[in-house]
Amino acid sequence: MLIVKAARDPSESAWILEDLIELMPLATLAMDESGSILFANCWVTELLGWEKDHFPGKKLATLVPQQFREACETFFGLCLRSPERRRPLEGLQLWALQKDGDDLPVELVLRRMTHVPDTVILATLRGLSQRRRAEDKLRAIQRQYRLAASHTVDVIQEVNLAEDRVVYVGDIDSLWGYKPGEFPRKLSELAEYVHPDDLEIFESAVEEFAKGKQDWSVKYRVRAADGTYRHIHNQGTMTGFLPDGQPNEGVGALRDITEEILKEQELQSLLAELKTAKDRLTAENVYLREELQEGLAFGDIVGGCDAWKHVEAQVHLVAGTDSTVLISGETGTGKELLARALHAESGRRDQPLIKVNCAALPSTLIESELFGHEKGAFSGADRRRRGRFELADRGTLFLDEIGELPLELQGKLLHVLQSGEFERVGSSQSIKSDVRLIAATNRDLAEAVRKERFRSDLYYRLAVFPMEVPPLRKRREDIPLLAMYFLAQQNARQGKSIEAIPKAAMDALLDYPWPGNVRELENVIERAAIVSPGTTLQIDLAALSVSPGLRGPDSDQSGESGLTSSAQTQQPTATSLQDIEREHILAVLESRGWKVKGRGNAAEQLGLKESTLRARMKKLGIQRPT
C-alpha cells in the first residue's frame, strides 16, 4: 500500500503527483490550465513511441492530427469550465500521433485534480486498436455462440432465486404460441405451466438447485398456448451465491424436444408391433412344426365316385365365402382333408390354418388352448401364451371333434363367434380376432342337442353350411384308386418298387366294410408294403376279417359287406397301377361322353390338362369307340 503525506510546499506536491502518475497503469499526462503538458508517465511513451522528455511544455492538442485538434481543445475547455466535476468526463474517441508517423485510435479521458495547490488536469489515453480487436473477437465469439445455440438450444435462461425471476435470452413466447411477455418470468409461476404428471420432477429440480446442486438436467412438459404440452430439456449450471453462501443464480438452456420424443414413441410403437409380429410368427412356426411332425392324415384328395363328387361340389360352393362350415362323418373319412381344401380355395389361403383337436385336450386346458392365457393365470403358466383364436387371426380355425367340447366352453365359443372378441385366461382385456371357423365331428350333434349335451344355439351357429363326408364303404369305386395312391406313397417312403396288387387282395379290399375308413385303408397298405419283398403287394387277408361289432352302421350282421350284386359286379379286375389308371380314365371318359375339351370335359373331372389327358390316353392305348 502506498501512503502519501500532505506536502508542505508546491514543489513537494509536484514530485509526489509525478510519482503517483508514474505508478498509474494507464498512459497518463498531467497538464496545467493552459493545456501545457507538465509530465507524462512511461505508458505514454510506450503507447506513442516518444521519449518522456518530448512531452513537457507541449500542448495536448499537438498530440493529435490537425482534424481532431479543435475537438480536443473544446473537450479540454469543457473540463476547465466544470471545476466541481469530480468524476472524469466521458471519453472522447480520436486519433493520436505516433513517433513513427502512424495515427493511433485512442480514447481521451480528462479529469481535474482538486486536492493540489494549482489546477492540474489529468489526461489518460487508452489505445482503441487492442480494445477493438478484443471487441471484434468477442463479437465473433458471440456470433459463433448464437449460431451454435440456434442449432442446439431454443432459449437461454438466467435464474435468480432471491428475486424470483427468470430472464430469457430468446423468444420464449412465440416458441410456444404465446403473446409477447405472456409466458411467466417468475420462477414461482412456472409450475402452473408444467404438466401435472411432471410437476414433481420440476419441483425436485428447483429444490436441488436451491440446495446448491452445481449442474442440473431435467426433462418435463410445459403447456403451450393452444393447450397442448411440449416436451423440453432444461439443463444448466449454478453461477452465483448470496453473501451467506446460499446459491442464488444460474444460467441454463431450454430445448424443445417434442419432435424427438414423438419420433422415439413412434419408434417404440413400431418396435412393439415388430415384437408382436415376431411373437406371432414364432407361435405360428411352433404350431406349423407340430403340424409337420403330425403330418397329413391322408395326403391329397383322391376320389371319383358320385358320392365324393357331391362333396367336392359343396367345397367349391362354400370355400370362397366366410361362412361357418360343419363337417360331419365317421372317424377316418377325411374331414380334416376337406377343411384344408376349404381353406386352400378361400380368400384366406395366404394366412394360417390353425387346428384344434377338442377330443385330444383335457377340459382344464382347452380354454387356454383356444383363447390363450396370461403369465400366472394358473399353476404352471410361467409365461404368456397366445391361443389358437389369436394365431388364426385373418385365417381359418379348424375345430376337430367339436362334439367333445365341454358345455361350459360352448357358451364362450358362441360369444366369440357372435362378437369376434375374446379374453385370455387371467385377463379382462378383450382381443379382436377375424377368424373363419370350420368344425368337424363324428357325433350326431342334432341328437346331442336333443339330449342337452350340446347347446342348440351353438349348433345352429356352426351348421350354417353342413357337409356330410361319406364313409369308405359307400365309396367302393374309389378303393382301387386310394389303394394304388397309398402304395405309390409307400414306395417313395420305403424305397420299394411294388407295382401290382393281386386280384384276390383287391377283391378282399373291396369286400371289407372299413370301419376305420380311409385311415384304416392307408394303414393296411403301409403294413403290407413293409412285409412285401418283391414287386407285388402281399396283403394278409386274414387281417381283413372284422368282428360284427366293428362293421359299419349300414352293414348287416351276417358278415356280408352289404354290397348289392351290381356293386359287386363293378369290382375291377386290374392288378397293376397302369390297369387301374386305364380303367379309371375309361370310366370318366364314358361318363363325360368322351369329351376331352370344352365345358364339363373328362380332363376337368380328372384334374388334368387337355394335352396331358391326350398323352395319357395315347400311352395307355385308349381310343374312342367308333
Image (cartoon, rainbow, N blue to C red):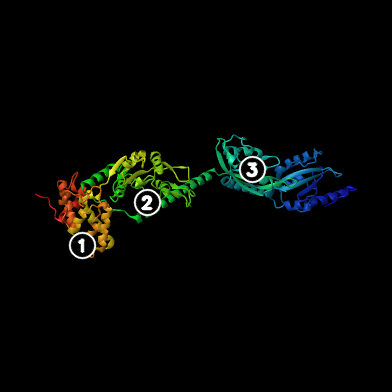
Q: Amino acid at mark 1?
A: Thr
Residue position marked by numbered label 3 in the rendering: 203
Nearer-the-camera pick, 33 or 86 = 86
Where does label 2 land, which residue? 360
- Residue 567 coordinates in the image, percent (x, y): 17, 49
Residue furthest to the right in view is 8
Q: Dividing the picture into quarters, in which one does residue 577 lie? A: bottom left
Residue 69: % across, % down = 73, 42
- Residue type indicated by callout 3: Glu
Res 92 quadrant in image: top right
Q: Is residue 153 visible?
A: yes
Q: Nearer the viewer, mark 3 or mark 2?
A: 2
Determine the secondary structure under disc 2.
loop
Instruction: State yes or no: discs 1 and 2 in contact (Cβ < 8 Å).
Output: no
The amino acid beneath tag 2 is: Ala
Sequence order check, earlier mark of 1 and 2: 2
Q: CA distance from mark 3 to mark 1?
A: 92 Å
| Mark 1 element type | loop
Discs 1/2, front: 2
Q: Residue furthest left?
A: 626
Q: Which residue does the numbered mark 1 point to in the structure image?
A: 536
First in sequence: mark 3 vs mark 2: 3
